[in-house]
């Protein structure tokens, strides 16, 4: 089993130069994670939150590529409906070049209604925008020399992607999915799969099985390193720490569920309505032995790759020291 990081920088509220402090702390944490033996670090993209979340993931990953040498660096995800796909293809290829082939290209359709409203893009157009964007990106990376594209949303004439990516034919492609039709689409189109951190272990394993069945139907072989399961990590060595962790997670889930809901519409990212259940049955919570037990349950279900979302660097150090050796 391999372990990576999932998340991103945030500004430090209420202090001067809070953005710089938050980004510096995140950069330091990824550099240390490489030293601790973590395999990868995946960075989110969000906009207009007021919480200082990362909005320009490819820029920050390029900086991280210069600060590291071994850890794989990925997006989780670039929300393609909001971007010019030809520019994304160029920027991603540049990052792959500068990282010496350590880039994983995670893409998605987006799920936060407020972000689509901010960009003045109807969320109902997310699928078609995503699919056309990927057509452009794949064509740009696969074509030697120049090409043209005449689509519904994008038109290009006699263009080319420079530089070409280092990993050929392109960096590994990852897709975030949760609904059965999206899981099946990811398998059929040859994407590696992200499974989100908000669902319970049972739901994650059900979604993994849908993806595996679709892979088999498409004549593809399941690779445990081709599915990354994100999980919140909370080290709790006593009852008081456990209660604090559960309260913090329930509060975070309530906020995240609001982002993924609008009226009667709900994203597949929205957790179980029972926030206590979603927390106790969905995160890596407890002392190292309990966390090992929870991970072994995922491993028995076919999971070979877990991305950790943690509030503290200390939790990652404890995980590297006391949990990772059990899966070496």
Image (cartoon, rainbow, N blue to C red):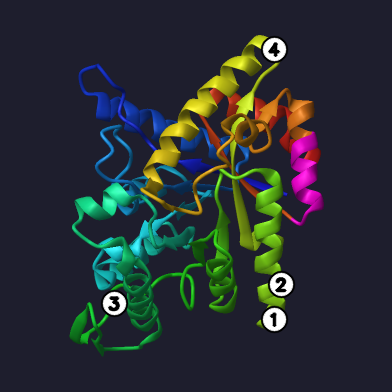
Please state, as top left, top right, bottom left or bottom right, where the C terminus lies in the image. top right
- Disc 2 or disc 3, which is closer to the eye? 2
Expressed as whole percent of the image width and height from the top left, the position of residue 188 reads 58, 78
Give the SS element for disc 1.
helix
Query: Distance between the Cα atoms at labels 2 and 3?
Result: 35 Å
Q: Nearer the viewer, mark 4 or mark 3?
A: 4
Residue pictured at 49% horizontal, 58% vertical: 102
N-term mark: 4 or 1: 1
Judging by the rendered image, the residue that carries numbered circle 2 is 213
Q: Which residues are magenta?
A: 293-302
Graded by Cα atoms within 10 Å as few (under 14), some (14 to 19) or many (20 or more), the crowding at tag 1 reads few
Q: Which image quadrant is residue 134 in?
A: bottom left
Question: N-terminal of the two: label 2 or label 3?
Answer: 3
* Residue at (19, 83) in percent of width and height: 155
Percent x, y of residue 69: 49, 48
Would residue 138 be counted in the magenta stretch?
Answer: no
* Residue 161 - label: 3
């Amino acid at each position: 089993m391999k372990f990576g990081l999932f998340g991103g920088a945030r500004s430090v509220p209420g202090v001067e130069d809070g953005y710089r402090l938050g980004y510096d702390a995140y950069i330091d944490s990824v550099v240390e994670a490489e030293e601790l033996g973590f395999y990868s670090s995946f960075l989110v993209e969000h906009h207009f939150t007021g919480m200082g979340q990362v909005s320009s993931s490819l820029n920050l990953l390029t900086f991280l590529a210069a600060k590291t040498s071994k850890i794989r660096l990925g997006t989780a995800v670039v929300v393609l409906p909001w971007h010019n796909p030809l520019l994304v293809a160029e920027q991603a290829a540049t990052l792959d070049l500068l990282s010496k082939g350590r880039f994983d290209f995670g893409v998605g359709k987006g799920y936060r209604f407020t972000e689509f409203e901010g960009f003045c893009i109807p969320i109902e157009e997310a699928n078609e925008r995503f699919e056309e964007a990927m057509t452009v990106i794949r064509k740009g990376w696969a074509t030697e020399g120049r090409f043209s594209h005449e689509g519904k949303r994008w038109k290009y004439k006699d263009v080319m992607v420079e530089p070409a990516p280092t990993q050929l034919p392109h960096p590994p492609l990852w897709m975030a999915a949760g609904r059965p039709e999206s899981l099946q689409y990811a398998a059929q189109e040859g994407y590696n799969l992200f499974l989100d951190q908000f669902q319970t272990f049972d739901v994650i394993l059900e979604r993994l099985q849908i993806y595996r069945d679709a892979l088999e139907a498409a004549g593809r072989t399941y690779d445990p390193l081709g599915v990354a399961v994100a999980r919140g990590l909370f080290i709790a060595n006593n009852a008081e720490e456990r209660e604090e962790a559960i309260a913090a997670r329930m509060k975070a889930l309530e906020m995240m569920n609001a982002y993924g809901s609008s009226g009667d519409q709900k994203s597949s990212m929205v957790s179980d309505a029972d926030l206590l259940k979603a927390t106790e049955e969905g995160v890596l919570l407890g002392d190292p032995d309990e966390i090992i037990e929870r991970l072994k349950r995922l491993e028995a279900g076919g999971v070979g790759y877990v991305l950790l979302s943690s509030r503290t660097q200390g939790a990652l150090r404890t995980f590297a020291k006391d949990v990772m050796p059990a899966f070496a």
